[in-house]
Image (spheres, rainbow, N blue to C red):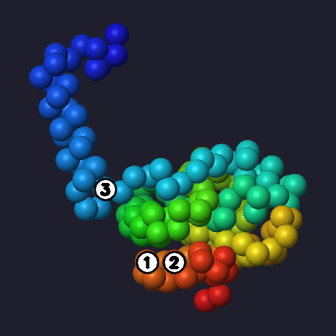
Amino acid sequence: MTADQGMNEQEQQQKQQRQQQESSEPGNLPSSSFVSCSQAELLEALDSGLVASSWDGIYIYSPMCGTCKLAEQMLTIVAAAMSELRLAKLNVQSAREAAERLRIQSVPCLLLWSREAEQVVQESDIQYVYAFHSVTYLYERLKGGRADD
Protein backbone atom coordinates (compact mmCIF):
# COMPACT_ATOMS: atom_id res chain seq x y z
CA MET A 1 0.00 0.00 0.00
CA THR A 2 1.41 3.37 -1.00
CA ALA A 3 1.09 6.54 1.04
CA ASP A 4 -1.45 7.92 -1.45
CA GLN A 5 -3.65 4.82 -1.13
CA GLY A 6 -3.80 5.26 2.64
CA MET A 7 -5.06 8.86 2.37
CA ASN A 8 -8.69 9.74 2.29
CA GLU A 9 -10.05 11.87 -0.54
CA GLN A 10 -9.82 15.15 1.41
CA GLU A 11 -6.17 14.54 2.31
CA GLN A 12 -5.37 13.77 -1.34
CA GLN A 13 -7.02 16.99 -2.49
CA GLN A 14 -5.07 18.99 0.11
CA LYS A 15 -1.83 17.34 -1.01
CA GLN A 16 -2.55 18.18 -4.67
CA GLN A 17 -3.36 21.79 -3.76
CA ARG A 18 -0.08 22.12 -1.83
CA GLN A 19 1.88 20.65 -4.76
CA GLN A 20 0.20 23.03 -7.23
CA GLN A 21 0.85 26.01 -4.95
CA GLU A 22 4.51 25.02 -4.43
CA SER A 23 5.08 24.57 -8.15
CA SER A 24 3.57 27.97 -8.94
CA GLU A 25 5.61 29.89 -6.37
CA PRO A 26 8.65 31.82 -7.63
CA GLY A 27 11.88 29.94 -7.05
CA ASN A 28 10.28 26.52 -7.42
CA LEU A 29 11.29 25.83 -11.00
CA PRO A 30 11.05 22.32 -12.41
CA SER A 31 14.21 20.23 -12.59
CA SER A 32 12.89 18.71 -15.81
CA SER A 33 15.18 21.16 -17.61
CA PHE A 34 17.96 18.64 -17.02
CA VAL A 35 18.43 15.27 -18.66
CA SER A 36 19.84 12.41 -16.67
CA CYS A 37 23.55 11.73 -16.55
CA SER A 38 25.30 9.10 -14.48
CA GLN A 39 29.01 8.86 -13.87
CA ALA A 40 29.14 5.75 -16.04
CA GLU A 41 27.36 7.54 -18.92
CA LEU A 42 29.69 10.53 -18.67
CA LEU A 43 32.85 8.41 -18.57
CA GLU A 44 31.64 6.34 -21.54
CA ALA A 45 30.84 9.51 -23.52
CA LEU A 46 34.27 10.95 -22.69
CA ASP A 47 36.01 7.73 -23.74
CA SER A 48 34.15 7.63 -27.05
CA GLY A 49 34.43 11.37 -27.68
CA LEU A 50 30.65 11.53 -28.19
CA VAL A 51 29.86 13.77 -25.23
CA ALA A 52 28.50 16.47 -27.58
CA SER A 53 25.97 14.12 -29.14
CA SER A 54 24.55 13.37 -25.70
CA TRP A 55 24.46 16.79 -24.04
CA ASP A 56 25.07 20.49 -24.74
CA GLY A 57 26.54 20.94 -21.28
CA ILE A 58 26.85 19.23 -17.91
CA TYR A 59 26.00 20.94 -14.64
CA ILE A 60 28.04 19.49 -11.77
CA TYR A 61 26.76 20.21 -8.27
CA SER A 62 26.62 19.06 -4.67
CA PRO A 63 23.25 18.71 -2.93
CA MET A 64 24.70 20.35 0.21
CA CYS A 65 25.89 23.45 -1.66
CA GLY A 66 23.72 26.57 -1.36
CA THR A 67 25.43 28.26 -4.30
CA CYS A 68 24.70 25.17 -6.39
CA LYS A 69 20.98 25.52 -5.66
CA LEU A 70 21.05 29.12 -6.85
CA ALA A 71 23.07 28.14 -9.94
CA GLU A 72 20.54 25.41 -10.74
CA GLN A 73 17.68 27.91 -10.59
CA MET A 74 19.60 30.19 -12.96
CA LEU A 75 20.23 27.33 -15.38
CA THR A 76 16.57 26.30 -15.22
CA ILE A 77 15.55 29.81 -16.28
CA VAL A 78 18.02 29.70 -19.16
CA ALA A 79 16.84 26.23 -20.20
CA ALA A 80 13.24 27.48 -20.26
CA ALA A 81 14.31 30.15 -22.77
CA MET A 82 16.29 27.64 -24.85
CA SER A 83 13.95 24.68 -25.36
CA GLU A 84 16.45 22.83 -27.57
CA LEU A 85 19.13 22.89 -24.86
CA ARG A 86 20.16 19.51 -23.43
CA LEU A 87 21.76 20.07 -20.04
CA ALA A 88 22.77 17.13 -17.91
CA LYS A 89 22.95 17.28 -14.13
CA LEU A 90 25.56 15.29 -12.19
CA ASN A 91 25.99 15.05 -8.43
CA VAL A 92 29.72 15.34 -7.73
CA GLN A 93 29.37 13.20 -4.59
CA SER A 94 28.24 10.22 -6.65
CA ALA A 95 30.71 10.88 -9.46
CA ARG A 96 34.09 11.21 -7.79
CA GLU A 97 35.96 9.35 -10.54
CA ALA A 98 34.54 11.61 -13.25
CA ALA A 99 35.26 14.72 -11.15
CA GLU A 100 38.88 13.65 -10.68
CA ARG A 101 39.32 12.78 -14.35
CA LEU A 102 37.89 16.16 -15.43
CA ARG A 103 39.84 17.96 -12.67
CA ILE A 104 36.73 19.68 -11.29
CA GLN A 105 38.08 22.37 -8.94
CA SER A 106 34.83 23.35 -7.22
CA VAL A 107 31.07 23.28 -7.49
CA PRO A 108 28.93 24.53 -9.02
CA CYS A 109 30.63 23.83 -12.33
CA LEU A 110 29.22 23.92 -15.83
CA LEU A 111 31.05 21.96 -18.52
CA LEU A 112 30.61 23.29 -22.05
CA TRP A 113 31.95 22.61 -25.50
CA SER A 114 31.30 24.14 -28.88
CA ARG A 115 27.82 23.29 -30.07
CA GLU A 116 28.98 23.84 -33.65
CA ALA A 117 31.84 21.40 -33.22
CA GLU A 118 31.88 18.03 -34.89
CA GLN A 119 30.42 15.17 -32.88
CA VAL A 120 33.79 14.21 -31.36
CA VAL A 121 34.83 16.29 -28.35
CA GLN A 122 38.22 15.79 -26.72
CA GLU A 123 38.59 16.45 -23.01
CA SER A 124 40.86 19.36 -23.92
CA ASP A 125 37.91 20.97 -25.78
CA ILE A 126 35.80 21.18 -22.62
CA GLN A 127 35.34 24.64 -21.12
CA TYR A 128 34.77 25.05 -17.37
CA VAL A 129 32.43 27.69 -15.94
CA TYR A 130 32.76 28.16 -12.17
CA ALA A 131 31.41 31.72 -11.84
CA PHE A 132 27.77 31.84 -12.90
CA HIS A 133 27.51 35.67 -12.74
CA SER A 134 23.90 36.08 -13.98
CA VAL A 135 21.14 34.46 -16.02
CA THR A 136 22.10 36.66 -18.98
CA TYR A 137 25.74 35.58 -18.72
CA LEU A 138 24.75 31.89 -18.66
CA TYR A 139 22.35 32.37 -21.55
CA GLU A 140 25.10 33.91 -23.69
CA ARG A 141 27.60 31.17 -22.73
CA LEU A 142 25.11 28.41 -23.54
CA LYS A 143 23.87 30.10 -26.69
CA GLY A 144 27.41 30.20 -28.03
CA GLY A 145 28.42 26.91 -26.46
CA ARG A 146 31.65 28.46 -25.19
CA ALA A 147 32.82 29.67 -21.82
CA ASP A 148 35.23 32.43 -22.76
CA ASP A 149 35.85 34.20 -19.45
Query: Quadrant of the rendered structure where residue 12 is?
Result: top left
Reply above or below: 112 against 93: below
Q: Is residue 122 left or right of residue 59?
A: right
Q: Is residue 5 left or right of residue 144?
A: left
Tell me what residue is drawn at x 64 percent, y 65 percent.
57
Tell me the SS state at disc 1.
helix
Q: Is residue 19 left or right of residue 84?
A: left
Whether residue 14 can be seen here: yes
Q: Which mark is residue 139?
A: 2
Contact (CB < 8 A) between labels 2 and 1?
Answer: yes
Whether residue 108 can be seen here: no
Quadrant containing the N terminus is top left
Determine the CA span between mark 1 and mark 3: 16 Å
- Which amino acid, by three-letter code, is at mark 1? Val
Tell me what residue is drawn at x 51 percent, y 77 percent.
139
Residue 25 coordinates in the image, percent (x, y): 23, 56
> According to the image, label 1 marks what residue?
135
Reply above or below: 22 against 8: below
Reading the chain from its start, which is encountered first: label 2 or label 3? 3
Residue 35 coordinates in the image, percent (x, y): 58, 51
Tell me the SS state at disc 2.
helix
Tell me what residue is drawn at x 45 percent, y 64 percent.
80
Residue 76 coordinates in the image, percent (x, y): 44, 63
Quadrant containing the C terminus is bottom right
> According to the image, label 3 marks what residue?
28
Reply above or below: 5 against 103: above
Q: Which mark is residue 117?
A: none
Tell me the SS state at disc 3.
loop
- How crowded is the residue under tag 1: few (<14 C-alpha within 10 Å), some, or many (20+)? some
Residue 23 coordinates in the image, percent (x, y): 28, 49
- Which amino acid, by three-letter code, is at mark 3? Asn
